[in-house]
Image: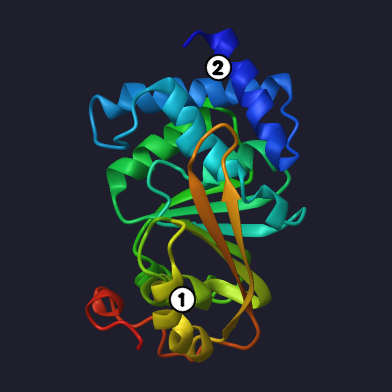
Amino acid sequence: MEEKEFKEELVKRAKQFEVNLSEKEQNQFYQYMKLLLEWNEKINLTAITVPEEVLTKHFIDSISIAPYIKENSNILDVGTGAGFPGIPLKIILSQNRFTLLDSLNKRINFLNEIISDLKLEKIIAIHGRAEEFCREEQKRESYDVVTSRAVAKLNVLLEYMLPFAKVDGRCICMKASDIDEELRDAKKAIEILGGEIEKIETITLENTDIQRKIVVIKKVKETPKKYPRKAGTPVKEPIQ
């Protein structure tokens, strides 16, 4: 896929979510794609290695939650991996502050190169686990928005996410389209952790059959101090 075609398709597809990309942003996305594929030959960052699919399944998919984020928000992306959805959101929401959290240091090295190469500001990449990072007092209940894409089942994922969100903040969970069972299993966790479901929306990425459920959880009260539990426990013993 040639650079011109990549940018034209990106601009067209981003408009589905009312995002109008500047020339600078188009260049940043193209550079991001190139670096992602270069680094992927050295370390496993993504199974998606065709530019057209990177555009759709990583970039446009990440952009899809932009309408849920207010200006000047402080945002944490939990389990960011190769930077999704955090980096695409940062490119188009440049005034917002972003923290990218991942448990693998090699991914953080990649993200730091992206941040430097794309000249992104007000963004940091942190190596750590959510359960431990949240023990830092200044991080707990300090974010307006907490995002996550395809990290874990909801009852596990929300134990990672909700303790970071301010009261009246939001957790935006990007899930596959079939989540009825997950929602049932997460009902108790949402209540215990201080959240309530604000909205669940289904989106279909334009010109594809890819569907995504966007689950928005509002933080309505403080999360009990015992959560998140120690590393590994949320997965082994999910709140039921």
In this rendered view, identify the residue nearer to me: 126 or 160.
160
In the picture, measured across the screen, residue 106 lies left or right of residue 137, that is left
Query: Can you tell which quarter of the image residue 153 is in?
Result: bottom left
Residue 6's disc is 2
In the picture, measured across the screen, residue 232 lies left or right of residue 29, that is left
Q: Are marks 2 and 1 in contact (CB under 8 Å)?
A: no
In the rendered view, would you say 45 is above or below 183?
above
Q: Is residue 172 visible?
A: yes
Residue 183's disc is 1
In the rendered view, would you say 170 is above or below 62?
below
The figure's colour scheme reads rainbow
First in sequence: mark 2 vs mark 1: 2
For label 1, the SS is helix
In the rendered view, would you say 149 is above or below 63?
below
Q: CA distance from mark 2 to mark 1?
A: 37 Å
Neighbor class of circle 1 (other Cα within 10 Å; few <14, some 14-19, many 20+) is some
Q: In the image, what residue type sits under mark 1?
A: Leu
Residue found at x 37% / y 35%: 110
Neighbor class of circle 2 (other Cα within 10 Å; few <14, some 14-19, many 20+) is some
Q: Nearer the viewer, mark 2 or mark 1?
A: 1
Question: How many marks can you see?
Answer: 2
For label 2, the SS is helix
Q: Position of residue 16 (x, y in %)?
A: 69, 37
Residue 137's disc is none
Q: Position of residue 52 (x, y in %)?
A: 46, 23
Residue found at x 45% / y 72%: 180
